[in-house]
Image: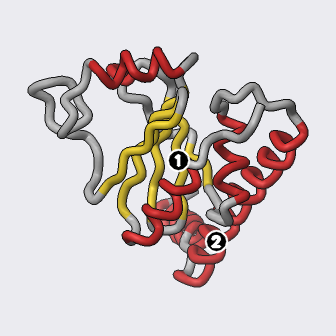
């Protein structure tokens, strides 16, 4: 293929790969709806499982869905190694949630005891948490609610502070 043919092919490929703002908005909205629907399915499944009284990912999702918060799970968020547990991250409207579920409340307390109470990071380390933020500690759960409005952070914190439910 000659140079003009390559240029035409390149132009066609570039035009086909462009999307309008409306198409991009529709694609992003569809992805958000799919994440919310996945959370609702996880919450329905968790509702049928017997409770141990400890937080699990399923119980966390169920609590957020039951509170009407439409959580969107984000698997790409990496846990902070010094937190000592995997992270479960959600977007809830304009707010975000980083939740760490420990084996038990003693493990959560031990992890928190190693952190500076002001920065919630190892001493001498800058805080990794966006501001404003709220900290929720409940049984084996440590959650940091970031961004969003005061009302959003309060709704999320209140839902988590209520606990996982009766065993």
Q: Nearer the viewer, residue 117 or 1?
A: 117
Q: Count the marks: how many?
A: 2
Viewed as shown, does residue 143 lie left or right of 13? left
| Number of residues whose C-alpha sits closer than 10 Å to that of mark 2, classed few (under 14), some (14–19) or many (20 or more) | few
Viewed as shown, does residue 40 lie left or right of 160? right
Secondary structure beneath label 2: helix
Residue farthest to the front? 166
Label pair 1/2, CB-CB below 8 angstroms? no
Q: Give the quarter of the figure containing the C terminus.
A: top right
| Number of residues whose C-alpha sits closer than 10 Å to that of mark 1, classed few (under 14), some (14–19) or many (20 or more) | some
Q: CA distance from mark 1 to mark 2?
A: 30 Å
Viewed as shown, does residue 159 lie left or right of 59? left
Task: Look at the picture and state if 11 lies above or below 147.
Answer: below
Quarter of the rendering containing residue 54: top right
Task: Look at the picture and state if 98 lies above or below 124.
Answer: below
Q: Residue at x 44, y 33 (%)?
A: 78
Identify the residue position indicated by label 2 in the image. 29
Q: Nearer the viewer, residue 146 or 104?
A: 104
Q: Which of the numbered marks, if any, corresponds to residue 161?
A: 1
> Where does residue 31 sit, x and y in percent of width and height?
66, 61
Q: Residue at x 49, y 31 (%)?
A: 100
Q: Residue at x 58, y 77 (%)?
A: 25
From where the camera sits, is residue 64 visible?
yes
> Where does residue 40 sit, x and y in percent of width and height?
78, 54
Q: Give the quarter of the figure containing the N terminus.
A: bottom right
Secondary structure beneath label 1: helix
From where the camera sits, is residue 4 visible?
no
Task: Look at the picture and state if 151 lies above or below 115.
Answer: below
Q: Nearer the viewer, residue 155 or 128?
A: 155
> Where does residue 11 sit, x and y in percent of width and height?
52, 71
Image colouring:
secondary structure
Quarter of the rendering containing residue 151: bottom left
């Amino acid at each position: 293929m000659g140079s003009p043919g390559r240029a035409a092919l390149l132009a066609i490929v570039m035009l086909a790969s462009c999307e309008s703002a409306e198409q991009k908005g529709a694609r992003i909205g569809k992805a958000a709806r799919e994440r919310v629907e996945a959370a609702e399915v996880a919450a329905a499944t968790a509702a049928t499982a017997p409770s141990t009284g400890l937080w699990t990912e399923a119980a966390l999702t169920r609590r957020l869905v039951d509170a009407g918060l439409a959580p969107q799970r984000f698997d790409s968020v990496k846990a902070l190694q010094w937190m000592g547990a995997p992270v479960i991250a959600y977007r809830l409207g304009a707010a975000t949630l980083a939740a760490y579920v420990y084996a038990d409340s003693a493990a959560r307390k031990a992890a928190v005891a190693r952190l500076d109470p002001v920065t919630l990071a190892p001493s001498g380390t800058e805080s990794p948490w966006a501001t404003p933020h709220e900290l929720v500690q409940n049984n084996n759960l440590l959650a940091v609610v970031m961004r969003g409005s005061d009302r959003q952070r309060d709704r999320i914190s209140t839902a988590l502070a209520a606990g996982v439910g009766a065993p």
